[in-house]
Amino acid sequence: METKRQKQAAELIKRNFGTVLREEGLYIYEQALVTVTSVKITLDFGLAKIYLSVYNAQDKDAVIQSLRENTTRLRFSLGERIRKFIRRIPGIEFYLDDTLDEMYKLNALFDKLEAENQLGKKDEEE
């Protein structure tokens, strides 16, 4: 269960890290579109787990890996933005959030089933 302070800090990091990605992301992962979906912060505010969605990239794990390689640079940029609002800048870790990809796959399966169902009804009517 997250405390109110954890939720506030996570939202602050989410908003500001999105801006950091917009400014510095082009140098790190080039053409991919990366968005912050959620942030989870530990009880001691020592670590922020940042969940990212990656679009327009063939190898999403490579994008996450390039972000991990540039963690120091990204954490510094984040620290510059949130220094006045949070006492201790947490360490950051990146995780791939593929829930939207799974949702699209499920929608495609449901559409396929619906099309097969409609085709079956047409065959029964004839």
Image: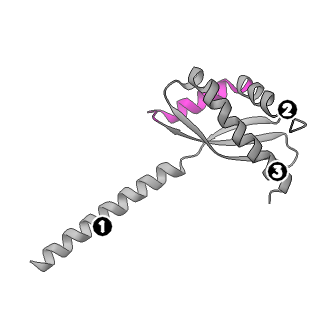
Q: Amino acid at mark 1?
A: Glu
Query: Callout 3 environment at 10 Å: few (<14), some (14 to 19), or many (20+)?
Result: some
Q: Which residue is the extreme one toward the right?
A: 87
Query: Callout 1 environment at 10 Å: few (<14), some (14 to 19), or many (20+)?
Result: few
Question: Does 63 appear above or below 109?
Answer: above
Label disc, if present, on residue 83 of the rendered structure: 2
- Residue plotted at (13% across, 79% down): 125
Asked if residue 116 lies left or right of residue 108, the reply is left
Q: Which residues are magenta?
A: 56-72
Q: How far across and down, in percent of the image, does residue 66 sit?
A: 60, 26
Q: How far across and down, in percent of the image, does residue 13 sit?
A: 75, 40
Residue at mark 2 to residue at mark 3: CA–CA distance = 16 Å
Q: Are marks 1 and 2 in contact (CB under 8 Å)?
A: no
Mark with earlier residue (1, 3): 3
Residue at mark 1 to residue at mark 2: CA–CA distance = 52 Å
Asked if residue 18 lies left or right of residue 81, the reply is left
Pointer 3 residue? 6
- Residue plotted at (30% across, 61% down): 112
Q: Amino acid at mark 3?
A: Gln
- Residue plotted at (47% across, 48% down): 101
Please state which of residues 12 and 63 is positioned toward the viewer in this rendering.
12
Mark with earlier residue (2, 3): 3
Label disc, if present, on residue 114 of the rendered structure: 1
Local SS, label 2: loop
Majority secondary structure in the magenta region? helix
Q: Which residue is the extreme one toward the bottom?
A: 125
Q: How far across and down, in percent of the image, does residue 20 sit?
A: 68, 30
